[in-house]
Amino acid sequence: MGCFGFLKTMMILFNGIIFLAGAAILGVGIWVKVDNGSVLSFLQGISAGQSQLGQVLNVGYLLIAVGAVLLILGFLGCCGAVRESRCMLLLFFVIILIVFIAEVAGAIVLLVFKPLANDLIKQAGDEAVKNIKTDFGKNKDITGLWNSTMTTLKCCGFNNYTDFTGSPFENGTGIYPTQCCRSSPCSGTTASNTDVPGCFTALKKLVDDNAVVIIAVALGIAALELAAMIVSMTLYCHIGSKRG
């Protein structure tokens, strides 16, 4: 087997795995959105008493999007290598390149334009607080999403418990979410004394604590993307030279 044959085989195997993974993720996402009752029963079965787990159904849309992208990439890469289709290989290369450029641009914004990134985070925080004050306790999806986030990260609101002051939940019940006190009922005084961190602070601490792992994973993904682009373009050029 020559170099071309080896690269072609690796391209087929690698993208075949991506295709199967994408199909599996897409299938789970569709199942989560279509058969909510079964998913909720399953979650309640493995963790009885934690009704907040039912809110992970909101992740269904994300799973569908990720699965669809992986499915398309896997199909283009695998089928392009098998059929030696320059069009598919080029499209595969372009999609990977766009994703890679977006990741690099995001890293540059975070590293070089940190004040800008902080401003964007502040704006996002203001929107999050506004979202809590208008919809928490009234909009089922928003309420569930925040409950799931606070339970997972062991946090309260975006900044702290005061984000819930004046919200439909606080106005209607006179108390704050249980996560803000780690006990029930959760009054303003108890929440203040408990001092549960905001979700932004908790998320920042989580990222800081796992910075090495996150950087290693990011570099690994970038290396895979570069390798995929190099292999796809090598096959593209080799197929072109054969037909020329």
Image (cartoon, grey):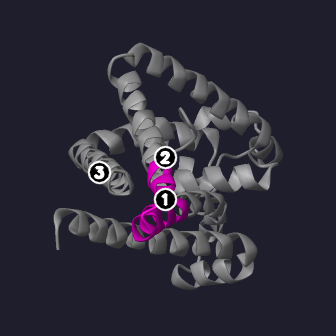
Q: Quick check: 101 left or right of 124?
A: left
Query: Tag on residue 234?
Result: 3
- Gap between marks 2 and 1, in whole Å? 8 Å
Which secondary structure is most common in the magenta stretch? helix
- Gap between marks 2 and 3, in whole Å? 16 Å
Give the mark nearest the N terminus, 2 or 3.
2
- Point out residue 96 in the picture as x, y percentages from the top left corner: 43, 47
Pointer 1 local density, CA inside 10 Å: few below 14, some 14–19, many at least 20 = many
Residues tagged 2 and 1 counted as in contact (Cβ below 8 A): yes
Disc 3 marks which amino acid? Thr
Query: Tag on residue 14?
Result: none
Question: What are the residue bounds of the magenta stretch?
Answer: 71-91
- Point out residue 45 in the picture as x, y percentages from the top left corner: 57, 85
Q: Is residue 196 visible?
A: no
Q: Secondary structure at mark 2?
A: helix
Q: Quadrant of residue 133?
A: top right
Q: Which residue is mark 2?
A: 95
Closer to the eye: label 2 or 3: 3
Q: Is residue 74 magenta?
A: yes
Give the mark nearest the N terminus, 2 or 1.
1
Closer to the eye: label 3 or 1: 3
Disc 1 marks which amino acid? Leu
Residues tagged 3 and 1 counted as in contact (Cβ below 8 A): no
Q: Tell me what residue is drawn at x 73 percent, y 80 percent.
A: 37
Q: Which residue is mark 1?
A: 73
Disc 2 marks which amino acid? Ile
Pointer 2 local density, CA inside 10 Å: few below 14, some 14–19, many at least 20 = some
219 up-or-down from 68: above or below:
above
Frontmost residue, 12 versus 223: 12
Q: Quadrant of residue 89?
A: bottom left
Q: Tell me what residue is drawn at x 41 percent, y 23 percent.
A: 109
Q: Tell me what residue is drawn at x 45 percent, y 54 percent.
A: 86
